[in-house]
Amino acid sequence: MSMRSILIGVSALALASCGSSEPGLDQTGARPDLPKQRQTLLPPMNIATPAGWEGEAPKAPPGFTVTAMATGLKVPRQILVLPNGDILIGEGMGGQDAPTLRPKDVIAGYIKSTGKTPVKGGNRVTLLRDTNGDGKPDLRTVFASGLNAPYGLAYAAGSIYVANQDAIVRFPYSDGLTQAQGPGQELVKLPSRINHHWTKAMTSSPDGAKLYVGIGSNSNVGERGMDVEEDRAQIWEIDRQSGARRTYASGIRNPTALAINPANGQLWSVVNERDELGPQLVPDYLTSVRDGGFYGWPYSYWGQHADPRVHPQKPGLVRAAIRPDYALGSHVAALGLSFVTGAGMGNGYAEGAFVGEHGSWNRQDLSGYKVVWVPFAKGRPSGKPQDFLTGFIKDGHARGRPVGVAYDPVGNALLVADDLSNTLWRIAPTR
């Protein structure tokens, strides 16, 4: 019997294990329902396998038009809109082959692999220019190549910053430049040992003096030992000029996207939480990030809910853990975050944030696989998340999977990177 057949058989057992979701739970907002912890020999695992769009497109609310702005990309991840309206897209797939600790790690790796694109990551940043705002680029070029799994992107004071999986590199930039002049200068190295969570999210401070970088954990709940978690599950603040850094927040398992709320200059993040406590634990979340704050990982979740799997237990840190601001639902895999600015997109999308949800693999009933809108008022979330871009799932298969999202204030549109169909989608008010 082949290894693939064995994995499929064992995966079927995982699907049949005690992992059904409890109906009626509300797992979004400031006070999500948190069920009892449910540990099983094999956690429930299921992923939407690729199907393709076949000429169709995602669905947006009435009053918006969805356009495939760019196709044939090589695993698009995060997006940056430059001051002149040019669009940068980081393309890549990183990570290293971390040693497997348990049979379930092998099974989980196989399950996740079935939901990915077969396209190899481009290790590049692509530039798009749309001069008349029709969603069809007049120019498409490679801005920078030869990168190492680029993910986070930022612009500040005449430079473009790219967060590779192992370092931040800086490219001098002037308005209208379409190709980097050279390989880029390394600003600071980033943790890359094992790199279980390889993505390095990034944004700049409102004044451009600092960069904020999210660094995910090297494990689910510290099962590899805490020595490999040094400088992990953190958000760093980095001086843009010198590269000097400090820990801005810690205990934040996998901060996959960072953004500044334009209403008050506050840093926010979407965070992927831990697995294997049940299909409805633990909710991924959106939160403001406090300077010096500790968010619980690995010792607790959603504030002071202790995780019994972690040894030794640290009750003092559990008591200090900050409860996140806003739950997005369990295992939705939020990877994108962008606030609207100015008057926003109209049609009720004037103050708030868009969140790209890549989609679950570790529960039987699929969750995520969409872009949601979180309304804000006075700098805080003010209501339930609203579906904004859907249709990624059809007949149990995935036609696409959202990653980065970026509001384009120049074109008054939302941009969504889809790393399964390798498309950049543009959603704009219908003219």
Image: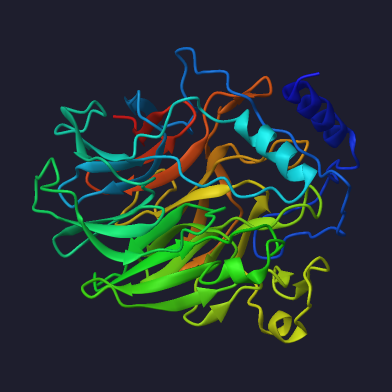
Rendered location of residue 39, percent (x, y): 87, 54
How many numbered circles are shown?
0
Q: Identify the residue shown where x is 36% and y is 52%.
A: 164
Q: Identify the residue shown where x is 44% and y is 13%.
A: 55
Q: Identify the residue shown where x is 91% and y is 42%.
A: 18
Is residue 273 visible from the viewing direction of this image?
yes
Q: In which quarter of the image is residue 66?
A: top left
Residue nearer the viewer, 327 or 422: 422
Image height of 159 relative to 403, above or below: below
- The image's colouring method is rainbow
Rendered location of residue 147, percent (x, y): 30, 45
Is residue 297 visible from the viewing direction of this image?
no
Left/right of residue 87 with respect to residue 106 in the rendered view: left
Image height of 320 relative to 31, above or below: below
Q: Quadrant of residue 179?
A: top left
Image height of 45 relative to 218, above or below: above
In the picture, the quarter occupied by the N terminus is top right
- Name, please, the residue furthest toward the top: 54
Residue nearer the viewer, 321 or 222: 222
- Name, please, the residue furthest toward the bottom: 316
Residue nearer the viewer, 382 or 125: 125
Left/right of residue 45 with respect to residue 136 in the rendered view: right
In the picture, the quarter occupied by the C terminus is top left
Residue nearer the viewer, 388 or 309: 309
Left/right of residue 86 with respect to residue 374 in the rendered view: left
Rendered location of residue 175, percent (x, y): 9, 50
